[in-house]
Amino acid sequence: MNNKIITILGSGFINRYLVRNLTKKNYRCIISTRKPFQKGYLKTQATPGAIELLEWNPNNFSALKEAIKNSDVVVNLIGNLYETRKQKFYKIHTSIPETVAKICSESDVKKFIHISAIGANENSKSLYQKSKYLGEIKALNNFKNTVIIRPSVVCGTEDNFTNLFSKLSILPVIPIVGIDYKFQPILVNDVADAIVQAIELKDNEKKIYEIGGPKVISFGDMVKSILKTINKKRFVVPMPMPIAKIQSTITDLLPFPPILTKDQCEILSEADNVVSNNHLTLKDLNINPSNVEEEMKKWLWRYKDGGQFAKA
């Protein structure tokens, strides 16, 4: 029996899949979250006592420091797709991994798995991508047993990508910014498997894994695939980047989550979000990725007219 202790920062989308995999291997998970009373469902992933929820405020590392000092492995899943008044990219993507890496170096932690993103680049005009890159550097420089995992767009039942465009199907016309932008969507289960494999593999410290699904697809074609899956016929048209930047500048000022930010426009104007082959990949983790277009049929049926009883 393994009985190793893992501290996981972040309790969002990927977490539930990762925790399920880890507890099957008899790992004990300590999950840090701002609001543990809202994350009780995570405890249903395993037997009583296997999962502990730790209330944590990013402005105070004292409680988290104690958890890390008693852990064998630390995994950082924290990330934001857009900035808010209180949550800035450099604080979330750069400062937190730097601080955690320093704590790991002062403890008996065997490995620190830091989840970044494909496209992380110090020369990017996107603050998201630049802060992700700096977070990687800070983590690698402050703890020798750090492993970086860069996923492409992660898809799954609770994602904010396939579900978003399924909801937008109420519109007769769906405008797409960066309609020819290519990415490599990966199933969340495969991301969770990759993290577990990276934890258990030996001699992969200071390595970077870029992970994506089996297919490279354009933004426009992926949206069309989503519409086909939910049996909706809509016009998918390109939105000019200058108009998108003006619109996103306005929506960035509104008090609710934006569909598209100005920073995301910068990302869509740069390199495609695909595995570069300059680093290790899923093959090095012995994982054969699932086809997202096939898998999304399992959760997008609820957007069909008639739901699960819709005609095929």
Image (spheres, rainbow, N blue to C red):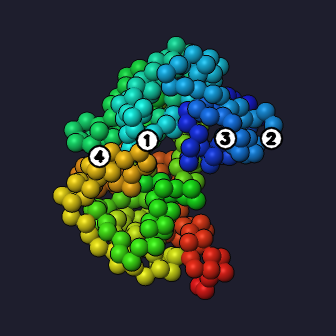
Q: Earlier in the sequence, mark 4 or mark 1?
A: 1
Q: Position of residue 169 (x, y in %)?
A: 45, 72
Residue at disc 3, secondary structure: loop
Q: Earlier in the sequence, mark 4 or mark 3?
A: 3
Residue kind at label 2, given as amino acid type: Thr
Residue kind at label 1, given as amino acid type: Asn
- Disc 1 to disc 3, C-alpha distance: 18 Å
The residue located at (33%, 47%) in the rendering is: 252
Q: Is residue 303 left or right of residue 171?
A: right
Residue at disc 2, secondary structure: loop
- Disc 2 to disc 4, C-alpha distance: 42 Å
Residue kind at label 4, given as amino acid type: Asp
Q: Is residue 285 left or right of residue 93?
A: right
Q: Disc 1 vs disc 2: Cβ atoms closer than 8 Å?
A: no
Q: Which residue is mark 2?
A: 47
Q: Which residue is mark 3?
A: 39
In the picture, the quarter occupied by the N terminus is top right
Which class describes the residues within 10 Å of circle 3: few (<14), some (14-19), or many (20+)?
some
The answer to whether residue 96 is visible is yes
Q: Position of residue 21 (x, y in %)?
A: 66, 46
- Disc 4 to disc 1, C-alpha distance: 12 Å
Q: Which residue is mark 4?
A: 263
Residue at disc 1, secondary structure: loop
The residue located at (57%, 56%) in the rendering is: 158
The residue located at (21%, 60%) in the rendering is: 243
Q: Is residue 267 left or right of residue 47?
A: left
The residue located at (39%, 77%) in the rendering is: 172
Q: Earlier in the sequence, mark 1 or mark 2?
A: 2
